[in-house]
Amino acid sequence: MAVGAAQYVRAMHTVAVLALDHVIPFDLSVPIETFGRTRLPDGRDAYRVVVCAPSPGEEVATGAFTLRAPYGLDALRTADTVVVPGTATPLAPLPAPVLEALREVAARGTRIASICTGAFPLAATGLLDGLRATTHWAAAALLAETYPAVEVDPDVLHVDNGQLLTSAGAAAGLDLCLHLVRRDYGSAVAADAARLSVMPLEREGGQAQFIVAPWPATPRGAELEPLLAWLEAHLDEEVTVERMARQAGTSTRTLIRHFKEQTGTTPLRWLHRARVRRGQHLLETTGYSVERIAGQVGFGSAGAFRERFKRTTGVSPQGYRRAFGGAGAA
Amino acid sequence: MAVGAAQYVRAMHTVAVLALDHVIPFDLSVPIETFGRTRLPDGRDAYRVVVCAPSPGEEVATGAFTLRAPYGLDALRTADTVVVPGTATPLAPLPAPVLEALREVAARGTRIASICTGAFPLAATGLLDGLRATTHWAAAALLAETYPAVEVDPDVLHVDNGQLLTSAGAAAGLDLCLHLVRRDYGSAVAADAARLSVMPLEREGGQAQFIVAPWPATPRGAELEPLLAWLEAHLDEEVTVERMARQAGTSTRTLIRHFKEQTGTTPLRWLHRARVRRGQHLLETTGYSVERIAGQVGFGSAGAFRERFKRTTGVSPQGYRRAFGGAGAA
């Protein structure tokens, strides 16, 4: 198992972290933390982490401090993995040299992973077109609108397309990095890295459990709004698609089309999600039993509510209350 | 509810984050992320976050990049809360002006919270003497040895002494900051902050679930070492304190004293912890049933193992396997 120094350097996996203007300090530090702490079973560093910026001599603003990166875009070209952290200005145009460098290394097969709103610059390269991708749940609707060729999934902690990976907001970047460590070196090394970051290797549930705003927050078009308000006020009642169509004064066929166009989903899925969201609110703010909440949000039984809640958020109502409850008890 | 701009500025809680030399980027960014994203129910910022350094004009090294903080130590004096992130050099002497500023603001009642190895500079001020405190589990023994007047608890995610708070490693800093948001503004605001950071507001279990090394890793004194090795080899057997004393060729009274001096705990607590640790290893690396593992680590029943495992780590054996298992299945 003796490895010479030269071979050691060659064998080490290099991760380049791209510090764009207005990079979010937390998203920047997540790959530095996770990859930088990872050790192989024999104690060697598993990764070399280099931070690079479009203009390495210049300071990069982060809002809280300015930083100077020791490397430039050349570091992307020699990296095995490129990480694109989120920025506070996701719609800012990507500098042409960055666009070029990302496309070039992608064509060469380099792995690229984004954290939080880092999905926006990655999408700007066109590399995510036709692929599933995720971002911070609060930015998912904006990503879908800005890059319609990207199939945005707001419910997961990360999406692995093999060469291209995206992750949800903030702490979900830790989940993504641990996922990559597991891909590269197996579960035992990744479990050690998780312990060093005091994070579970795999979290139960997806990003859905953190979503409280309706998605999309504002429907793309106004026709449905009166119906959606009516539905929110009648979540405890039995509501069929036919009843919705009558309420909206239209045919079920037209209603389904309007839902698809304006909310991106079907009437019943929208209703289920609204009920789960109301259920989340009640679990957070009251001490009501799951049975009582199930009735208040229109489920015939606690069992049906539990199943739908778990399917939507990835956690049980009880697990959700443990994670986010407390206001009712305070 | 209309609030004038001046009142708004005065009312806002200021958090000063101290960037010492070799600050860990992740620990630095955790309070920037959590407090910086927190909003009050009416949409206003809940905190003003300022990053400060001992010499604000000079660049601070982090290992991965250098940073320039916009504020100096004066920011500590006007803050409501001071956060001390961990550094890569926890035993480095604290600059005299930092020591002085921390003691001065503490005397004035300012709240001070440390993240990860940030407990070391905080302990260096003497402020933690006689108090319970925690740090990254891998640094807990070093903290206890370096600052014997501090009562180090390596098993929790954070310790709240009211004015002085400490947290465990890395991601546990997120738990601490969310805890402070809850103290300052209540559960609903904290739950929103948690969602924005894609973190549960409260995590199940303490830091113990991440600890695999024995604690302390090396006993302070060599007499016990042969007995500890013997115990590790006989974890599956029934071992009483009397049997340990016979094995060590000493009285139970002397044995108990040696354990206290050299491991900081009692013989049975040490044995329970060693058994739980072995159980963790088996849960990670094998697909054995909990019943089988209970037998292999010296518990008479799966129920007794489950109870002890949960009491020590804060999570169930099944929960632990979900979080850290996978190597056995790979």
Image: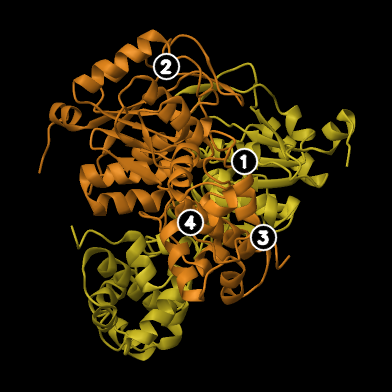
Chain colours: A yellow, B orange
On the same chain: label 4 and label 3?
Answer: no
Residue B330: percent from left, percent from top: 73, 65
Q: Position of residue A29 (x, y in %)?
A: 55, 36
- B192, A53: nearer the viewer: B192
- Determine whether label 1 and label 3 are within 8 Å by CB: no
Q: Chain of mark 1?
A: A
* Helix, strand or loop at mark 1: strand
Q: Residue at x 62, y 68 (%)?
A: B296
Q: Residue furthest left?
A: B1
Q: Are marks 4 and 3 in contact (CB under 8 Å)?
A: no
The residue lying toward the viewer, choosing from B179 and A236, is B179
How busy is the neighbourhood of tag 1: few (under 14 within 10 Å), some, or many (20 plus)? many
1 or 3: mark nearer the eye: 1
Point out the image quarter for the N terminus of chain B. Answer: top left
**Mark 2 Cα shell of 10 Å, populated few (<14), some (14-19), many (≥20):** many
Q: Secondary structure at mark 2?
A: loop
Disc 1 residue type (three-letter): Val
x 61%, y 24%: residue: B63
Q: What secondary structure is found at the residue carrying circle 4?
A: helix
Q: Amino acid at mark 3?
A: Leu
Q: Nearer the viewer, mark 3 or mark 2?
A: 2
Q: Which kind of residue does numbered mark 4 sit on? A: Val
